[in-house]
Image (cartoon, helix red, strand yellow):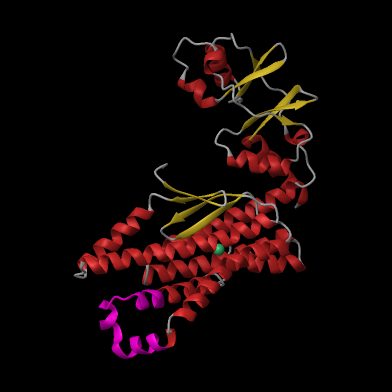
Amino acid sequence: MKLSLNLGSISGIKIIVHWTFFFLILWIVFDELKRGGTIGSILFNLAFVLAVFMCVVLHELGHALMARRFGVKTKKIILLPIGGMASLDKIPELPKQELLVVIAGPAVNVVIAILIYLVVPIQELANIRLIEGLESINELSIQIFLLYLFIVNIGLVIFNIIPAFPLDGGRILRALLAMKIDRVKATQIASSIGQVFALIFLLLGLLYNPFLIVIALFVFLGAYGENQMVLHLSLLEGHTVEDAMMINITLFKPDDSIDIVVNKIISGTENNFVVINDLTIVGLLYHKDIIDNSNRNVLVKDVMDTNFKTLDVNDDLKKVYSLIHSKRRSFFPVVENEKLVGAIDSVNLNEYILLQSKLVY
Ligand SMILES: [Zn+2]
């Protein structure tokens, strides 16, 4: 779903609120109303959640701005009900750089906690809280607000130290391990530990807090996915597009009828095609567009996409891996000295990775 709210940019990084975030706001309002809350207490709670998420944005900016120091760009920071996520273009592979990028996030929360500690008598307030018990939570003041915000920031730091890869703590563990052993092995160990923590989160979530179930899923799948990615990238190290591309590809001309293309899909295994005119690539035919137009009397040129990217035979397969996995339409013509020599897509690349894994293990 594309229903997300763009809050604007900070140093060129878009801050985006995911649509599910609004359920959190609704949940807070209903929860307060159920507990007999007033307009004042509802606003207090909403303001508090917004303040917490401000801290989360600053935490993510910590990662993003440190990554920028190592030449890694960040497109956006997305806010989800379970927390924030900075989409870094890549994670620095040098363990020392990764360590600094990861630590920069929780370090921001440490700084926020220290700043609050300096302006609010935390100790005193905490003692009063303990003596008066939960009853006094109804009392709303800026000091109470900051006390809670202090506790949340400390909580964020502690949560981010748990070595549940791919959460911050797990990344710290991976970076530390990668200083001693191979990065692929380090990732395998960190993600196995991450998945154990995911199961613990799941159990605690079932017993106490449903939010933990969502985090458990995120950690479990994230650990699996990143472990696979690191393994795949290591298998592609030193390989170029030429090694993995398809050579026997069917070509079409702009004036060909779409019927011939449909027949080709049915009679063969190719799904996407390159369109050429006098040896020049003029467009690409994607499977979905072909199927969508299969019952219409149209030509290839009416269906082809003319906005496409070509790859060179000498391009690094590691870079192509990221490109193919970031695009919805992952089919690229391959050229050598500007002449079409083949094409590559995700199925093709995955097959190549599979073959490489058989050679290595
Ligand atoms: Zn973080």
Determine if the magenta segment contains residue 135.
yes
Along the horizontal axis of the image, is 42 left or right of 262? Answer: left
Camera-nearest residue between 233 and 111: 111
Residue 173, image x and y in percent? 65, 69
Residue 2, image x and y in percent? 42, 41
Q: Is residue 114 above or below residue 258?
A: below
Identify the residue shown where x is 75% and y is 31%: 312
* Secondary structure mostly taken by the magenta-highlighted segment of the chain: helix
Q: Which residues are magenta?
A: 124-148
The answer to whether one can see residue 66 in this image is: yes
Residue 107, image x and y in percent? 58, 70
Identify the residue shown where x is 65% and y is 29%: 309
- Quadrant in the rendering for residue 210: bottom left
Q: Is residue 174 above or below residue 276?
A: below
Camera-nearest residue between 304 and 155: 155
The answer to whether one can see residue 193 in this image is: no
Along the horizontal axis of the image, is 262 left or right of 150? Answer: right
Determine if the magenta segment contains residue 274.
no
Q: Is residue 201 above or below residue 254?
A: below
